[in-house]
Amino acid sequence: MRVKPNIEPMIPYTPGRRAPGGIKLSSNENPLGPAPAAIEALRRTADSIHIYPDQLGEPLLRAISDTLEIDRARLIIGNGSDELMVLACAAYLDRDENAVSARHTFSQYEYATRLFCAEYRPVPMRDYRFDADAILSAVDQETRVVWLCNPNNPTGTVMPPAEVERILRSLDRTTLVILDEAYHDYMDDDDARLDTRSLVDHYPNLLALRTFSKIYGLAALRVGYGFGSTELIEGLRRVKQPFNVNGAAIAAAHAALGDHKHHAHSLEANREGKRRLYDGLSALDLEYLETQANFVTVRLPADATPIAARMLDDGVAVRPLASFGLPEWIRVTVGTSGQLDRFFETLEPALRY
């Protein structure tokens, strides 16, 4: 059978690869794993998996509501933040309209846009950051969505808060701004941090997305959340499937959100790992981008794909970035000390090949 014309050119998502029995530094997972409280919460769900979960995930919604000090009517949870991206386009993006984003960013923005027969407009970046001028110059009367990723995947860079607010001020309120903050918890530069909670109060067309897949270590459970105006969230709830997040994920995320010790430990381990990567990459005279996420993006002296393949053969998986339009770059998750030792042990001979 022939797929619909808008689907035909779409390429299935390529996940980070792994070497059986090796070290995976290709998908930005928390190398410390989930919080102990989340593991215990998962165990307690075993006796109730024959019962459908709460349709809105109320236990988790209440915990997020208390954390953000925001009404539950302004929150929605999803099967990963990826699902919420699709729901946003299902509710607010139509055929013959368009969405604008940056050239080197998360591929799911284009996927969600094209899924609903809309045009996707990627614009150039400035110093590997989202460029407010380029984004605004691409916006026209048919633009219904602007995608922002902050910190950006795969570069780890952030937009200055004033630039994000300039975009919000400049856009018509009929244009939805989707702010993907999957790596928000890893930010350690207070001057670069957005006051997203206040922004959603001032801009009813702003949808902020966060995830439990990264610092909370729950990537396999697929749970994320979004917050914005009551009207905006109501639109997403109209198009979501019932029971879209499973009960085990709701329970584990609820427990993880309250485990502040594990959160702090994960953040400090990430800071130490970043310093280790910066020092080692500098010693190899390799260009890299300073990051506000849990990965470092590195420019290699040649096409990164065969170099990454040699590293994979040696048991270490990193992410070559040709699919992001950066063929000479790799993305490396900030791993444990031992994992980073292996990374450098495999990188050096792979470069000399």
Image: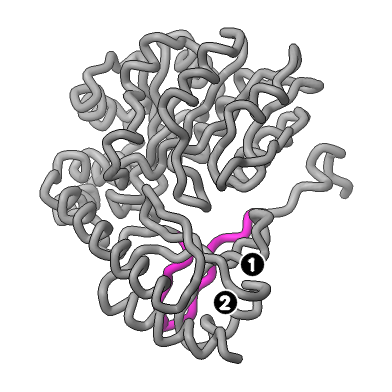
Residue 38, position as x, y percentages in the image: 20, 50
Amino acid type assigned to the residue bearing label 1 in the image: Glu
Sequence order check, earlier mark of 2 and 1: 2
- Residue extending farthest to the left is 261
Residue 264 in the image: above or below residue 150 = below
Residue under circle 1?
328
Q: Is residue 304 magenta?
A: no
Q: Along the line of sight, which residue is nearer the eye, 134 or 203?
A: 134
Q: Is residue 140 visible?
A: yes
Q: Along the line of sight, which residue is nearer the eye, 202 or 46?
A: 202
Amino acid type assigned to the residue bearing label 2 in the image: Ala
Under tag 1, what secondary structure? strand
Residue 68, position as x, y percentages in the image: 24, 24
Task: Please give left or right for residue 343 compared with residue 147 in the image.
Answer: left
Q: Is residue 243 visible?
A: no
In which quadrant is the C terminus drawn? Answer: bottom right
Residue under circle 2?
308
Report the magenta residues as a range.
Answer: 13-27
Residue 219 in the image: above or below residue 93 = below
Cα separation, mark 2 vs mark 1, equals 10 Å
Residue 201 in the image: above or below residue 24 = above
Residue 141 in the image: above or below residue 215 = above
Can you tell which of label 2 and label 1 is closer to the viewer?
Answer: 1
Under tag 2, what secondary structure? helix
What residue is at 70 percent from the left and 20 percent from the top? Answer: 139
Query: Are the residues at dot 2 and dot 1 in contact (C-beta closer than 8 Å)?
Result: no
